[in-house]
Amino acid sequence: METFYQTFRRRIAISVAIFLTSSVLLINSFAYPGRKPFSSSISGQLKAEKRICITLLEATPEKEVDLVVSSSEEEESDDTNQPNSHHNNKNIHKRFAPKVAWDRHHHATFHLVHGDKTKVDALTDYATVGTTLHSQPLPKRVTSLLSPNSQLVSSSKEWKRLKEHQEKIAKTHLRDLLKDKERCDSFFAETDGVYVDYSRNRATQETMDLLYQLAYKQDLKGKMEAMASGEKINFTEKRAVLHTACRAGRDEIGSVIVDDVDVVGEVHDVLDQIKEFTDGVRSGAIRGYTGKRLRNIVSVGIGGSYLGPEFLHESLKTEPEGINAALGFSLRFLSNVDPVDVERTCADLDPEETLIVIVSKTFTTSETMLNARTMRQWLWDFMGNDKEVVRKHVVACASISSSDLVADFGIDTKNYFFRFWDWVGGRYSVCSAVGAVPISLLYGYDLFEKFLEGARSMDKHFFNTPFEKNIPVILGLLGVWNMSFLGYNTRATLPYGQALLKLPAHIQQLDMESNGKCMTRQNIDVDYPVGEVDFGEPGTNGQHSFYQLLHMGQTVPCDFIGFVQSQLDLCLDGEELSSHDELMANFFAQPDALANGKTVDELRAEGCPEQLIPHRSFKGNRPSNSMLLPKLTAYATGQILALYEHRTAVQGFIWDINSFDQYGVELGKKLAIDVRDHLKEARKEGNNKEVSTGSPATDRILNYYIKNSRSLCRQADQTDESKKMPRDYPPSHHNLGGQNGKL
């Protein structure tokens, strides 16, 4: 039996924990009186801990307490905005009744202040309280609430209900679900010409309702508002996430303030600067070093500084307005540090008519800056190394904090430097100067502005539409459902429009760099699957590449993207259908084939040989979404971009991870710097020592590389290309001599 003194000590210690918890909650409410987005989760956690302490107050070693409420706030939740939410007080244990609990709290606190406080001052850790004050461990149901994993979304009742529901869905088939007309008629959403049919997902209305409940539990609306208002939701880097501000209208100037800066006002200052500069280049008012017009643009960047702008460029290249606007100009992208990429980019270009756009937020990205120095050397080789060559032919898009590095490179920071900000991540930066400068130089600023308007349209839909009709929210929640509950860890983006050939690569980076994480906001390892592997290819090319796997291999949820009208329609005489109709016939057929498959009975009815039936039957039951837009224009491209940006954010918000940092990229960069140092040492004249990195596997292959490339390197060093005398142009054989080290 527990003695009176042991009981007294235990209750006083628990009261200390309750008192400290209450104090933290009170301080939080005073420190952030107007804060909404994340306060509910903090408050909920503290309330849960408070209830744990109250429960422990009644616990004894001999009597296990019946816990009714978990740390996930099963009965006393804060999701008051959730439809049909209520507090089911009849199931709450009588010891959780507010009056009884707080009477005990004040009674224990009084004795703590006025009585013997020794030996209990430092007992604030609940787990420590349990192991110190009892000769026996705490009841299992109590210690489970004290576990860090109780803070994971997977411990919530909403998540557990979805896990249970998944078992029911596992017994269904899309072939049957698609016969439910009422379900099919309700499983679509539409906004401003964007039509999305999600009826071919392995989901019922109950599934969607449970997913919406999970969204409310995770305070999705609050997190969306936090992002839009400029709160620093990139918690690891302590930055706001405001790519949406890059396409905000002028009427929104003054609506978002971050660190005392009017964000939207800053954005429009830069856009005005870009418009003036690009109009000047296109009109011929701004010219190159030798007085020639600048007709060729080379954008130097990597990752988000390249993939997004190239996706936009390819989308506009065959758009009628884009075709007319780009006449007389060309745009190329240099991203790979491989010298072959440099050679291919520069071949047949006249340096006197070429403008180099260097895109790097920090202006330190090693691959980008090496390519930038290579392009600068290319300009010098042809026009001499006068500093005005760089000032007239090189433009920088970088953060304002990099202005000194931009100036050191030789760039005119007053007229040829276009800034963007730390609150714009690289993969989210297409709407900033990163995309605005190269795209406006080629197509004109007016067409780029239409792209921004399309993205703005999707932003308004995302932030203002109820979840049940919100396209990015629906697709994000279905992404969570497919990945975390159905176990589909791969996803395909399949645009039925050749102009979107670079969209899958952009989404690949957008999704995988954003949600390829393993840690939650609470610094706890996730115990549920997150972050799909994304890939894709335009239809119908993909059909003759990897659709075999989509139909008969592992299950891969797909996004089909199609258009009512082609950018450039074609109908041959004598053909019953236009080329676009032929394309769209495949667009409509593939989702049904994936969903329904082909049964054994159907094959027998068609007379299929019995021995081939196992090889020609398709199980089906493979989920997909179908997205239809009127036509691929600059405006529609903006809508598509913003839709997928928001889908990615929604999944990250639900999974409780940071979708806006990329430390995984940094590790490889750091190791590359170390290897580079070893290579520098190995390349020194007379140094024939083997490299030692500390890793036998790395040493072996690195030394093999050094040994077999040393002679080639020294041979290239012997070439002496003048930096002052221009080379004859154009090269007769379209070869700039890169293979001989002349670049």
Image (cartoon, rainbow, N blue to C red):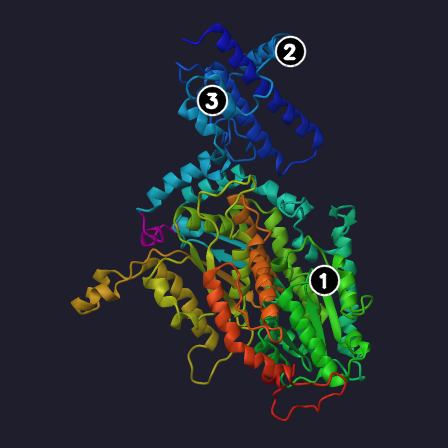
Residue at disc 2, secondary structure: helix
Q: Single out the mark in the foreground, 2 or 3.
A: 3
Residue 488 horizontal/vertical position (percent): 40, 53
Q: On residue 113, which mark appears? A: 2
Task: Please identify the quadrant where the C terminus is shown.
Answer: bottom right
- Mark 3: amino acid: Thr
Task: Please identify the quadrant where the N terminus is shown.
Answer: top left
Residue at disc 3, secondary structure: helix
What residue is shown at x 65% (from left), y 85% (from top)?
719
Which badge, 2 or 3, is on the more N-terminal residue?
Answer: 2
Above or below — where is 179 with respect to 525? Answer: below
Residue 105 horizontal/vertical position (percent): 57, 14
Left or right position of 672 against 375: left
Which badge, 1 or 3, is on the more N-terminal residue?
Answer: 3
Q: Which residues are magenta?
A: 172-182
Report if the CB atoms under discs 1 and 3 are less than 8 Å apart. Answer: no
Residue behind mark 1: 398
- Mark 1: amino acid: Ala
- Mark 2: amino acid: Val
